Amino acid sequence: MLRMTLLPQTLLAVALALPTMAAARAQDKADGRELLIRPNPKAEWDSSIRDVEKVLRSAASELWKHFPERRLAPILVEPKGGPIVLYKRGPNGEYRVRLDTGSTYWAQYAFQFAHEFCHILCGYTEGEQSNKWFEESLCEMASLFVLHRMADTWKTDPPYPHWKDFAKHLREYADKRIADTALPPGQSLATWYRENEDALRKSPTDRKKNRVVAGILLPMFEERPEHWEAVTWLNTIRSKKPRSFKQYLTDWHDQCPARHKAFVRQIASKFDIGLQAD
């Protein structure tokens, strides 16, 4: 596990921090869409809450920038008991995220939080779970996407100047997980899916399988990150009865705005599923 050794924090270090992240946050506040992420001060943290908040905010920002029309309740985060985002909200409507990390393992903080944040963006819900594996796979992809983007961002705009050298470790953390779950040469995602469909529907949180899907779809989202916004409509239609994966994707496609429909069809095609254009 990669651990970042913190240098003493000084007021000078904070003052010298590059302004890009702060400027983006100020713009979000002006637009009424500021994302509030709060490490629970009552939890037992074994690292600086201020530093944890900066890491979580940095991770969230890499996705949040692609949701210009979204507004979210605050997110209350605890270091243990997960990783999970609870269905039950806090007393003031807060999302409640629990991680399973600590110390200064910033890559792990970012990886876990990005996954749970993606569930929030997907409109996660209780109920029939036969296609939950797909949302789980998107959220694993979100973790990989975020670490890649953070690695680039931290090269020039880290939360603190002395964190710049940690950027390469963020990418290494993601790339190792992609390599460990890569498909065999010559095997398509569609073929792999047909072989694993029953297992996916029975065990939606099989992380190795989730990451196979994530690794294949990741380049699509890295090339066209504006389509992250499409997950907003992933769970718009809720069913008490099991749906086929094709029907699940059809429902998603039909609920999406026109600007995202072709992209959803491209995702479906990776599974050899054809969706009809409107």
Image (cartoon, rainbow, N blue to C red):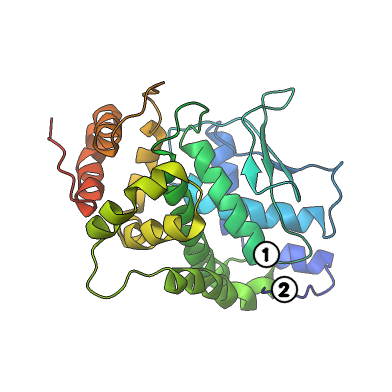
Q: Which residue is mark 1?
A: 106
Instruction: Place residue 243 in its image quadrant.
Output: top left
Residue 200 percent across, percent down from the top left? 40, 48
In-front residue for pair 192/9: 192
Quadrant the C terminus occupies: top left
Q: Residue at x 26, y 49 (%)?
A: 267
Q: Is residue 266 left or right of residue 35?
A: left
Evaluate whether residue 134 shows in this view: no
Give the x, y percent position of residue 109: 66, 58
Q: Nearer the viewer, residue 163 or 40?
A: 40
Q: Check whether the beta carbons of the residues at disc 2 and disc 1 lie within 8 A of each other.
A: yes
Secondary-structure class at tag 1: helix
The amino acid on which the numbered mark 1 sits, given as a three-letter code, is Trp
x, y percent for residue 86: 64, 35
Q: Is residue 181 above or below residue 131?
A: below
Q: Quadrant of the N terminus?
A: bottom right
Residue 60 at what x, y percent from top left? 56, 49
* SS of the residue under disc 2: loop
Q: Amino acid at mark 2?
A: Met
Q: Which residue is mark 2?
A: 4
31 relative to 215, above or below: above
State how many labels appear. Answer: 2
Residue at 36% x, 28% y: name it. Answer: 242
Look at the picture and state if 194 lies above or below 163.
above
Residue count near mark 2 (Cα–Cα under 10 Å), binned few <14, some 14–19, many ≥20: some
